[in-house]
Image (spheres, rainbow, N blue to C red):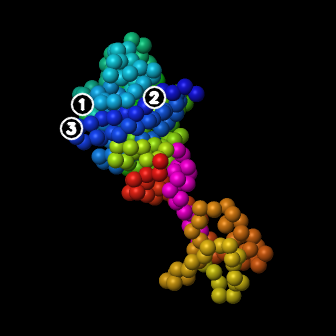
């Protein structure tokens, strides 16, 4: 599969401070990639270089086959950008704002089609100042999509949304995949990255510390799954291969493991053989947030 973004040895310095330390990054065409990192990690600097808004000190960068530092205006028409904070003219309706934006492109999408894609058809004639926060964010995306971009940068697209609006926005972002767009997403919401992204890249201290799917990242930091149940006083001893500990307060039996299937199979087989109910059985996999915190606290797994 061809790459929409190729980065090799990217370096950016501010005086003696090296904000980005020789990172490599690939984003395939049609992929949704989540780019995660704490404040000061080099995430924003890297994204701004990819967008052509900031120069670099070293390294090779190709976005849609073009060096952003030397990109012509025609290249700008191939990318869409949704900034973390932006707002259309308050006196324009959603339809007017998107139609005006379409006028900047040589071959834009039909504004009515774009409004439908982002779910603003019913609010198309509402002035921007009267749109809800979620509707304004949809308008931001419509403004980015009307140029029919191949690549979309989404910077914290659901910051400040309530849970319902976030879920609606996820559906909207997933529709970009169906349109064939490549998406580079930055977010502080771990569940958002896990739900939307094909792959996740974590940056910390100016370096890529991990990359892969959520499950692959968990393996890189040996994040454990927690299996718990409440044993009865009369049940026989469980298999010796299970690394069981006990919570003296709750009485729960606990198995923390990276070999989830093997240990779960041993436990349930033993329970079936001995007619044991395994009361309150629970299997809690590590969340992406758990993994992310371990990666960024420890300095990484790459």
- Label 3 sits on a secondary structure element that is loop
- Label 1 sits on a secondary structure element that is loop
- Front tag of 2 and 3: 3
The answer to whether residue 193 is visible is no
Residue 256 falls in image quadrant: bottom right
Mark toward the start of the polypeptide (3 vs 1): 3
Decide: is 167 above or below 108: below
- Where does the N terminus fall, quadrant-wise? top right
* Image spot of residue 132 (x, y percent): 32, 40
Q: Residues within 10 Å of mark 2 (few under 14, many from 20)?
A: many
Mark toward the start of the polypeptide (2 vs 3): 2
Residue 271 appears left or right of 244: right
- Front tag of 3 and 1: 3
Residue that label 1 marks: 90
**Foreground: 155 or 111?**
155
Q: Is residue 225 on the magenta stretch?
A: yes
Residue that label 2 marks: 5
Q: Are marks 2 and 1 in contact (CB under 8 Å)?
A: no
Mark toward the start of the polypeptide (2 vs 1): 2
Q: CA distance from mark 2 to mark 1?
A: 34 Å
């Amino acid at each position: 599969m061809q790459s929409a973004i190729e980065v090799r040895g990217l370096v950016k310095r501010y005086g003696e401070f090296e904000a980005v330390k020789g990172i490599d990054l690939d984003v395939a065409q049609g992929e949704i990639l989540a780019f995660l990192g704490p404040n000061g990690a080099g995430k924003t600097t890297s994204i701004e270089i990819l967008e052509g808004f900031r120069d670099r000190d070293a390294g090779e960068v190709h976005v849609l086959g073009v060096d952003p530092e030397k990109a012509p205006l025609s290249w700008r028409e191939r990318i869409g950008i949704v900034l973390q904070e932006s707002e259309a003219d308050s006196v324009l309706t959603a339809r007017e704002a998107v139609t005006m934006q379409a006028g900047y492109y040589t071959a834009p999408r039909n504004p009515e089609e774009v409004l439908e894609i982002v779910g603003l058809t019913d609010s198309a004639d509402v002035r921007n100042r009267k749109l809800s926060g979620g509707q304004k964010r949809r308008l931001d995306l419509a403004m980015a999509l009307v140029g029919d971009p191949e690549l979309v940068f989404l910077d914290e697209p659901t910051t400040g949304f309530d849970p319902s609006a976030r879920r609606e926005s996820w559906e909207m972002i997933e529709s970009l995949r169906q349109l064939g767009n490549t998406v580079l997403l930055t977010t502080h919401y771990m569940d958002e990255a896990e739900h939307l992204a094909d792959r996740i890249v974590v940056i910390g201290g100016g370096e890529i510390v991990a990359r892969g799917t959520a499950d692959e990242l968990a393996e890189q930091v040996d994040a454990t799954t927690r299996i718990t149940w409440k044993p009865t006083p009369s049940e026989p001893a469980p298999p010796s291969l299970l690394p069981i500990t006990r919570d003296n307060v709750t009485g729960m039996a606990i198995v923390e493991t990276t070999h989830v299937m093997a240990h779960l199979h041993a436990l349930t087989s033993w329970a079936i053989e001995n007619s044991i109910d395994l009361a309150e059985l629970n299997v809690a996999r590590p969340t992406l947030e758990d993994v992310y915190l371990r990666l960024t606290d420890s300095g990484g797994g790459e």
